[in-house]
Amino acid sequence: MKTYKLIQRYPGIQDYIKLGDEATQLYENGNYICNISNYRLMKTEVEGWPKHWEEIKIPIFKTHDGFEIFENMKDYIIVVNSDFEIIYRGKYYTNQNLEDYTVFSHITLAEKWLDDNKPTFSKNNIREAIKNSTSGVNPFVSVKSHLNDELKL
């Protein structure tokens, strides 16, 4: 689905379509509907005037690391499942359902996130255990005890 914004008027465009109005492609034949006036525009009225209509890129979603994914991108994504495993490295396809996964834009970011968040003695678990350790007690015993309690080992 494409969306365009009118940035310059041209001969033949209806008076009630104003600068800044957006047109979204909604019909199977490629025609558009103007978002403000609900006026139907033929595909050639929008795509045939590229100097007058500017395509608005709307991201499909953002990866965990904040990278915006757009339709038909050639960039690759890294998908991590709930078992903290990288299960896919490749191009994003618009029909992929990624709701139950954590998605990254780069393998090193995915690996760092896994390293910090994998539930068996992750760096964050160890940092938290050290922060909560009792002074006067062997810190390694305290950390091990905290991790055993937290991870139910």
Image (cartoon, rainbow, N blue to C red):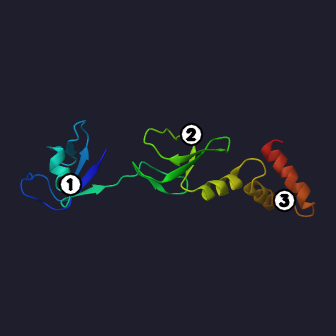
Occupied quadrant, residue 55: bottom left
Q: Quadrant of the N terminus?
A: top left
Neighbour class for label 1 at 10 Å: few (<14), some, many (≥20)?
Answer: some
Between marks 3 and 2 in the image, the one whose residue lies nearer the viewer: 2
Q: Residue at (91%, 55%) from the top-left corner?
A: 141
* Residue type, mark 2 in image: Asp
Horizontally, is 26 left or right of 37 in the view?
right
**Residue named by callout 1:** 21
Instruction: Name the amino acid, label 1.
Output: Asp
Q: Are marks 2 and 1 in contact (CB under 8 Å)?
A: no
Image coords of residue 76 (percent x, y): 51, 52
Q: Could you say which quadrant of the image residue 7 lies in? A: bottom left
Which residue is identified by label 3?
133
Q: Secondary structure at mark 1?
A: loop
Q: Which residue is mark 2?
A: 100
Mark 2 vs mark 1, CA separation in Å: 36 Å
Horizontal and vertical percent position of residue 144: 87, 52
1 or 3: tag closer to the N-terminus? 1
* Front-lying residue, 133 or 63: 63
Q: Please tell me whether residue 40 is drawn above or below residue 46 in the rendered image.
A: above
